[in-house]
Amino acid sequence: MADTRSGQRVPTVVADGVHVTYTVQGAGRAGRGGATAALGRILSRTRTAPGTRTVHAVKGVSFAAYKGEAIGLIGSNGSGKSTLLKAVAGLLPTSEGRIYTHGQPSLLGVNAALMGDLTGERNVILGGLAMGMSREEIRERYQDIVDFSGINEKGDFISLPMRTYSSGMGARLRFSIAAAKSHDVLLIDEALATGDARFQQRSRERISRLREEAGTVFLVSHSNSTIRQTCDRAIWLEAGRLLADGPAGEVVDAYEAHTRKK
Amino acid sequence: MSTETLAPPRVHHPPEEDLRALALRHGLSVSGARPSLPEYTRQLWSRRHFITAFATARLTAQYSQARLGQIWQVMTPLLNAAVYYFIFGVLMNTRAGVPDFVPFLVTGVFIWTFTASSITAGTRAISGNLGLVRALHFPRASLPVSLALQQLQQLAFSLCALVLILFCFGVTPGWSWLLAVPALFLQSLFNTGVSLVLARLAARTPDIAQLMPFLLRTWMYASGVMWSVEHVLANNHLPHAVLLALECNPAAVYIDLVRFALIDSFTAAQLPPHVWAVATGWALVAAVGGFIWFWQAEETYGRG
């Protein structure tokens, strides 16, 4: 446990009274009309235009995360876990409060850069570049990425377009690409639910190795057993508020007791 | 929800006023803050490999499901030219008074398409890639720049088709063809700048994407893509200033410069005065202004 380690603990992510709100376009809006309707909407556009709604997803969350910690984020659907993760990554601005980070936290979300029409091989390169790796780094780690994903275990699948992959194969390749880069702070959103048992085991090993490389890992998951096995600390969010923050076992116990009660 | 009544097991974070001090003591930086303009330019440069890889990937993914595959890269512009020739050359006969009408028309269509499709792509650069913007960290200008680069690659295919058509209609290559290189370079700068502007506008107001086809079509008809502005409008008794404005609009300038470079019968007399200065001016204003304006909203992209 990070708490019991000797020496001074080094914070990597500090959230100080963080609120995140965002506006949703197209809530209850009439169908998109032709050019004249569009013009009318643009001309009549005000700050709080009708058809947009403000969502207050995270309400005053504070915590400090330290080097070497793996922190699980738990809570029911829509409790603000993913939003908080995106705010830590600097991808959603905070409306109040601040998030301080050591280096650039990265969301394990390389899949957005990948293209189904391209071969797995080209997607490894494209994904690596999208994460900010250099061409040399990718060339060095290319074989590791392919081997870790296990894509080529049943034939030469890496040279086929990614759209021909099964969902499990795709998820494995995506995780392998994303985990190839060493991150100061790695944010994982529901990534471990995919893949077969053997791949899940390998993923857990990769995460603990990332932690040993003096990083901090945040993990959002609905699988309580994954949180127990992978994390040493857990943060429980409910309706955007921080309900509990402590050792993973205790927090997950309390969360399970709460979900059973409902 | 009755969560308020539930006793949390053990909340152990330091009091809130300590957190800021803790963060500053360890030299942490604020997440998601906008970098300075020089720093932003440096970051964009360090992502140049991503920008080119993304452009090429998009280009190859485009026709990967078609039977004929990459042949469509050349087929699409050729078919476009055929359609415009049928309507404007055969049905409406705007060819009157224009020597080498087919090369004139095809050059116009291809060069216009380069600007139009760059701008259309720029409009969707942020709003169409929200998944990417919300998942990964990179200077957002990479997206519009990359899409503009994709259109430049597409133009390379169109130019192959263009050279083919020019040969077929008896235009002979000469040293003046080299003038097309600086003209296309300036046009690319201009396109990228306008793409950056529209990417920011459409990121805030997605409705812009619905309006663009109408604006672009109006612009196309005003730029003399299918006819010579001079020949068609000369007898309409328009004031000289209007004619000059039409000829100095950026699309017309770049189209006429490439026509001047490629087609011998298109002479310097048909170009507006100080044409290279105008072309450079448009390119610099659009590129520098667009880049700075896009950067100013960097931290807001992908919000909501």
Image (cartoon, rainbow, N blue to C red):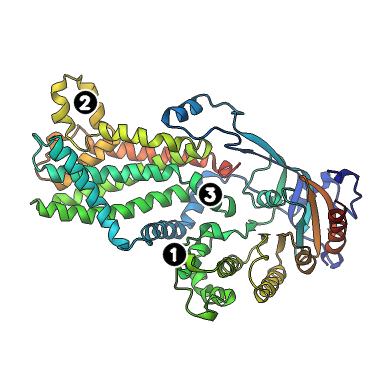
Question: In the rendered view, would you say A258 is above or below B208?
Answer: below
| Image quarter in which the N terminus of chain B is found | top right
The three-letter amino acid code for the residue at tag 2 is: Leu
Identify the chain of the residue marked 1, using the numbered disc in the image: A
Question: In the rendered view, would you say A174 is above or below B47?
Answer: below
Q: Which of B78/A88 is in front?
A: B78
Which residue lies at the image location 38% right of the left edge and 49% below the top edge? B148
Mark 2 — residue?
Answer: B243
The three-letter amino acid code for the residue at tag 1 is: Leu
Q: CA distance from mark 3 to mark 1?
A: 32 Å
Mark 1 — residue?
Answer: A118
Mark 3 — residue?
Answer: B39
Q: Secondary structure at mark 1?
A: loop
Question: In the rendered view, would you say B47 is above or below B240?
Answer: below
**CA neighbours of label 2 inside 10 A, class few (<14), some (14 to 19), many (20+):** some
The image position of residue A169, as x and y in percent, is: 56, 70
Q: Secondary structure at mark 2?
A: helix
Q: Which of A9/A209 is in front?
A: A209
